[in-house]
């Protein structure tokens, strides 16, 4: 997995999701990512070249799948991620994915057409995500954002803070009850409250760290995740 440098969530959370499993191992390398905003300086953090270099390093560990474990494609557009995975596979011979492409695969696999979106980002980033997802066939029918820009700060959000916002989205407070909720950010601790939110609202929840790991496991032909990380992700759809 290629990780944003300032991300302090996804590595420990990935290990927790795998618990005592010995059938798979996960290996990480980093590229520099500091701030999330809609501007050229932020966009340059997600250039393909350093990611391909990082993927080449991971290839030396004889990995079966490479994932860019960041959600930038959700606002920059998934075509950039599609180009990235082609470049990674061409350079390494290893199948590749990204967090955003994993979400799109999950939306298609589980029939998610109406989505409740929750992120730590600013309103304009969420608006861009909604536009990108709509172009791929999934409409954001409600959104909540925390208004943060510094990536390192996202992991400081307490999981409990996401619960009331999730309830609002699940109840259709913005006009329509969603097919699923998505916690879009791999540096946000949404996974610890997924089971609680699903139990209380009866709406499936897709957490970015879980969705990326789910897609990597399916691509590698490995066993799925436990239900507590998202009831939709327990199969190999």
Image (cartoon, helix red, strand yellow):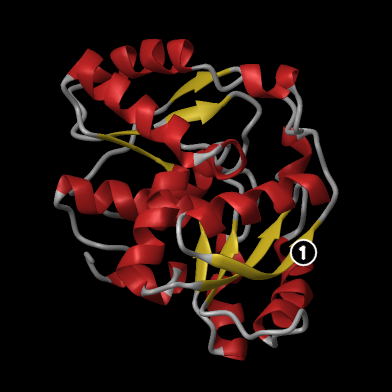
- How many numbered marks, from 0 up? 1
Say whether residue 150 is visible: yes
Q: Is 33 on the left or on the right of 152, as rendered?
A: left
* Crowd around label 1: few <14 · some 14–19 · many ≥20 (10 Å): many
Q: Measured along the vertical axis of the image, is residue 215 above or below residue 179?
A: above
Spot the residue most to the right. 147
Q: Quadrant of the C terminus?
A: bottom left
Quadrant in the picture for residue 79: top left
Please provide percent x and percent y for residue 166: 70, 74
Q: Measured along the vertical axis of the image, is residue 110 above or below residue 106?
A: below
Q: Is 212 on the left or on the right of 92, as rendered?
A: right
Please provide percent x and percent y for residue 167: 71, 81
Name the residue beneath numbered marker 1. Answer: 144
- What residue appears at the point 28 percent right and 26 percent down from the top-left corner? 86
Spot the residue most to the front. 135
Q: Is 156 on the left or on the right of 178, as rendered?
A: right
Q: Measured along the vertical axis of the image, is residue 168 above or below residue 115?
A: below
Q: Is 44 on the left or on the right of 25, as rendered?
A: right
Q: Between residues 226 and 113, which one lies in front from this camera angle? A: 113
Say whether residue 18 is visible: no
Quadrant in the picture for residue 155: top right
Q: Between residues 219 and 16, which one lies in front from this camera angle? A: 219
- What residue appears at the point 34 percent right and 64 percent down from the top-left corner? 108
Please provide percent x and percent y for residue 120: 75, 51
Please provide percent x and percent y for residue 53: 38, 10
- Under circle 1, the secondary element is strand
- What residue appears at the point 55 percent right and 62 percent down from the top-left corner? 191
Q: Quadrant of the N terminus?
A: top left
- What residue appears at the point 51 percent right and 54 percent down from the top-left corner? 135
């Amino acid at each position: 997995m290629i990780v944003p440098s300032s991300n302090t969530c996804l590595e420990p959370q990935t290990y927790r999701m795998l618990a005592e499993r010995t059938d798979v191992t996960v290996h990480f390398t980093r590229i520099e990512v500091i701030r999330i905003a809609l501007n050229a300086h932020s966009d340059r953090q997600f250039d393909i070249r350093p990611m391909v270099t990082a993927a080449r390093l991971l290839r030396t560990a004889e990995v079966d799948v490479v994932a860019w474990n960041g959600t930038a494609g959700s606002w920059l557009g998934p075509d950039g991620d599609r180009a990235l995975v082609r470049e990674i596979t061409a350079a390494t011979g290893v199948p590749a994915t990204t967090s955003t492409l994993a979400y799109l695969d999950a939306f298609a696999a589980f029939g998610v057409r109406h989505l409740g979106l929750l992120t730590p980002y600013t309103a304009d980033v969420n608006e861009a995500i909604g536009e990108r997802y709509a172009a791929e066939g999934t409409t954001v029918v409600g959104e909540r954002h925390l208004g943060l820009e510094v990536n390192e700060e996202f992991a400081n959000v307490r999981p409990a803070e996401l619960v009331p916002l999730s309830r609002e989205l699940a109840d259709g407070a913005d006009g329509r009850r969603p097919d699923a909720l998505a916690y879009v950010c791999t540096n946000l601790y949404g996974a610890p409250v997924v089971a609680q939110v699903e139990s209380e609202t009866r709406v499936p929840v897709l957490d970015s760290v879980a969705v990326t790991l789910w897609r990597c496991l399916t691509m590698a032909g490995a066993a799925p995740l436990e239900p507590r990380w998202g009831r939709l992700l327990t199969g190999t759809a």
